[in-house]
Amino acid sequence: MTDAVVPTEQVAGKSLWRDAWLRLRANRAAMTSLFLLVIIALACVFGPMLSPHPYDRVYQAYVKVPPSVSPRPSDAEVERALETALRRGGVEIEGAVVEGGVVQVTLTSEREIDPRVTRLIDRSDVFSEASVLSQSTDGRRLVLSAMVNQNRFLMGTDQNGRDLLTRILIGGRVSLTIGILATLVALAIGVTYGAISGYMGGRVDNMMMRIVDVLYSLPFMFFVIMLVVFFGRNFVLMFIAVGAIEWLDMARIVRGQTLSLKRREFVEAAQAMGVRTPAIIRRHIVPNTLGPVVVYMTLMVPKVILLESFLSFLGLGVQEPLTSWGVLISEGAKNIQGASWLLIYPSLFLAVTLFCLNFIGDGLRDALDPKDR
């Protein structure tokens, strides 16, 4: 009697990327940072669409208003807004009553009051739909009403009277977009250049690396200022200028990885089978360098954001009415004494984003490190 053969269960293997994802999920700091970064990115993308304040809307009645969750204007602000709006009307305010979002104003004058004085009130950011309720027979006394526009500025307004929260979210769009696009430009150029240089070796490698050394010697600020002088300040120029410099580090990293990969067995087998050099680089070299490249990408994005902020701080960044975190921080630094929130909130958004990206980079480095398994 023969023993029955018991079938054994097949254990599914784990790919490199799945194993790295499982290890990354176990890193609480990296996952928390990833969650916060997604929240910030979604807020920057959809927040301005949901905000009641356009990013370029100027509220002349609310210049450098401090942050508050309470609606504006208050009763005292209503009176001041009425005095400011009617200053050119040659009238005096006898009394004003605010009730249910509507203000009733009694005006007096030594001469007949023109009913078109309501236009002065409608021009204010505080009031709308002004209308005359009654006027005395001699025309020197007039009662009018107007709707009081309620506005909330959760993070206050800037020195021009624009909502700071909306501008921070718009600035986040610009800063994150420049960071990501410049990193992708550096990735495309650096990976291709470094893989070709490392795989070809010899004189080709020496010549290509000497070009990199020459480009390293060029001052970054001189290069950016030259581009701004010739092409002007615009959004596209920013990430092209930054990405055209940052690819140098990426090329060196990929070249070093390629030098160790081109002597591996699978590359030699492809060469023996007659696979052409471009196909070997595309199918075998580049995919096996993606581990260090992904880690470096997460560290390059905050570096590019800081570079953009530095350029915007110097006045070489995006143009108004667009803004970025660097522009907002620069404006906040000028108004730090009387309006500290103009510096605190943009700096907080920038700092949290940079911390998140660095924690994610550290987590990916640990997850993709074969010595740490």
Image (tube, grey):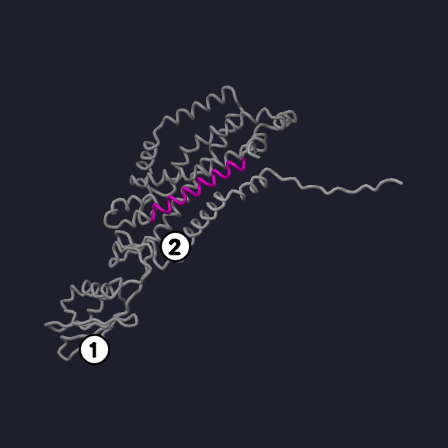
Q: Measured from the top left, where is residue 137 in percent x and y?
A: 15, 80
Which three-letter amino acid code belongs to the residue tagged 2?
A: Pro
For the N terminus, give its image quadrant. top right
Q: Is residue 257 left or right of residue 65?
A: right
Relative height, residue 99 to residue 187 (above, below): below
The residue under label 1 is which amino acid type? Ser
Asked if residue 57 is among those painted magenta in the image, a careful observer would answer no
Relative vertical location of residue 87 with respect to residue 131 in this rendering, above or below: above
- On screen, residue 134 versus residue 286, left or right, reads left
- CA neighbours of label 1 inside 10 A, class few (<14), some (14 to 19), many (20+): some
Q: Name the element at disc 2.
A: helix
Q: Nearer the viewer, residue 129 or 249?
A: 249
Q: Position of residue 292 (x, y in %)?
A: 51, 33
- Drawn side of residue 89 relative to residue 34, left or right: left
Q: Which residue is mark 2?
A: 48
| Residue occupying the far bottom of the picture | 137
Question: Local crowd at mark 2 within 10 Å, few (<14), some, or many (≥20)?
Answer: some
Q: Write the residue at 37% across / 26% down.
A: 217
Q: Is residue 124 above or below residue 216?
A: below
Residue position for label 1: 134
Looking at this rendering, what residue extends furthest in the right direction? Answer: 1
Q: Quadrant of the C terminus?
A: top right
Image position, residue 138 (x, y; %): 13, 78
